[in-house]
Image: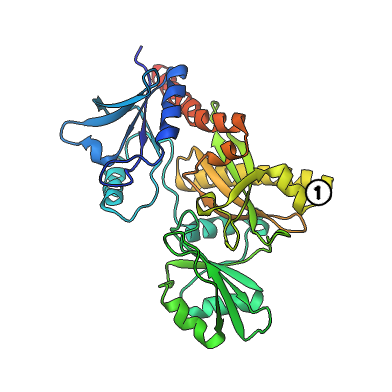
Amino acid sequence: MPQPVLGILTLYLNNRKKLEEAPVYERMITEGHNLGLDVFVFTPADVNASQGLIHALHFNPQTRKWSRRWRPFPHMIYDRCRIQKSERFDQLIRFRSRYKHLLFLNRPLRNKWTVHQTLFRVKRFRPHLPETTLISSIGDVTRMLGRHHAVYLKPINGTGGRGILRISKGSHSHDTYEIRGRNTQRNIITPKRLSVAMLGPFLSSWDIKGRYLVQEAIPLELPSGRVHDYRMLVQKNGLGEWQVTGCVGRVGALNSVTSNLHGGGSAMGMNELLEEWISDASKREKIREDSAKLGVDVASFLENQYGALCELALDLAIDRSGRVLLLEVNPKPAREVFSQVGDKEAYRVSHIRPLEYALWIYNNRKNAKNA
């Protein structure tokens, strides 16, 4: 009986063929071996289309060494590719188009704005969505500031906190705006205080029209002044069902407008962080229930809208009243939040669930063919 084969599709970080998540792949290949699943890693650049072969990357759990071998296309593909500004990403677009008939565990999501619109059309999701608008003119920003004390400007295709700005009304004068944020390299920019007249020219230099959305800022500052939110990982399990793998609190670096770990943030247990924020124990329990239900519901709905998905990370905010708000959805989630808080079980499960789901799909397809 042939062994099921899973190919992990990724992109090299540079022209020296460096893998972004090599430790993650090493663990998944090792766990796959234990489950009876043959797992290798490849990128679009490793595909020989004329021969129908892949110059695949293999990891040996015994020797802890990587090697290459020519392989046929796998039975299933697990897409871990994140957006890059490179020829490598262009290769990925061509690969996805040429081989769209193959069995993918997960398909790309749309950009942040399209996902927000898709969710907003559904009545049950609206109470969980901050007010959000695609920026077509500077007026969209000023109108939002007319309704809220502060707003966030986010690139519709951004990741990791890159290029995010927070604009708030001046603390001493409503004729000024205070601006903080990060540039596209994730570096914290020097805080600025601008007059109303200077806001437009400043934002024009960021080229935001059609590329950014503006979102109401939920007050999330802890007594320390640092912002916080929660990262929830929702994955398909070995029965093909959506399930919450775990949820971790994130606290931003000093003077940061985001909580991203790559931007200097730190992880905390969800319960520990909630206790700092919400004093009522019964309210905290309801928050945990509401957030888990929302996570599974959103994942199931987006899969129905956009096609195959096997995991999503939801960035959640909890306001002082206990309302759960969905800030954004990430289809290529990292796992390091669980290791940072010492949740070894969630960290282990986060690697295994895509493998168990792949086996479930493979066996279902095989049984259907034999029926």
- Where 363 falls versus 264 (above or below)? above
Quarter residue 86 falls in: bottom left
Q: How is the image coloured?
A: rainbow
- Where 3 falls versus 145 (above or below)? above
Q: Is residue 151 visible?
A: yes
Residue 58 position within the rendered picture, expressed as x and y whole percent measured from the top left:
32, 26
Residue at the image position 16 percent from the left and 31 percent from the top: 51
Badge 1: few (under 14), some or many (20 or more) residues near its Cα, within 10 Å? some
Residue extending furthest top? 1
Residue 362 position within the rendered picture, expressed as x and y whole percent measured from the top left:
42, 24
Q: Secondary structure at mark 1?
A: helix
Q: Amino acid at mark 1?
A: Lys
Compared across the picture, whether 206 is left or right of 90 comes to: right
Residue 195 position within the rendered picture, expressed as x and y whole percent measured from the top left:
56, 85
Residue at the image position 47 percent from the left and 18 percent from the top: 35
Query: In this figure, which residue is indicated by the disc labeled 1?
Result: 283
- Where 265 falls versus 57 (above or below)? below
Name the quadrant of the N terminus: top left
Residue at the image position 33 percent from the left and 56 percent from the top: 85
Quarter residue 104 falls in: top left
- Where 45 falls versus 352 (above or below)? below
Residue 293 position within the rendered picture, expressed as x and y whole percent measured from the top left:
67, 43
Residue at the image position 66 percent from the left and 84 percent from the top: 173
Name the quadrant of the C terminus: top left
Compared across the picture, whether 68 is left or right of 212 comes to: left
Number of callouts in the render?
Answer: 1
Quarter residue 70 falls in: top left
Q: Is residue 297 visible?
A: no
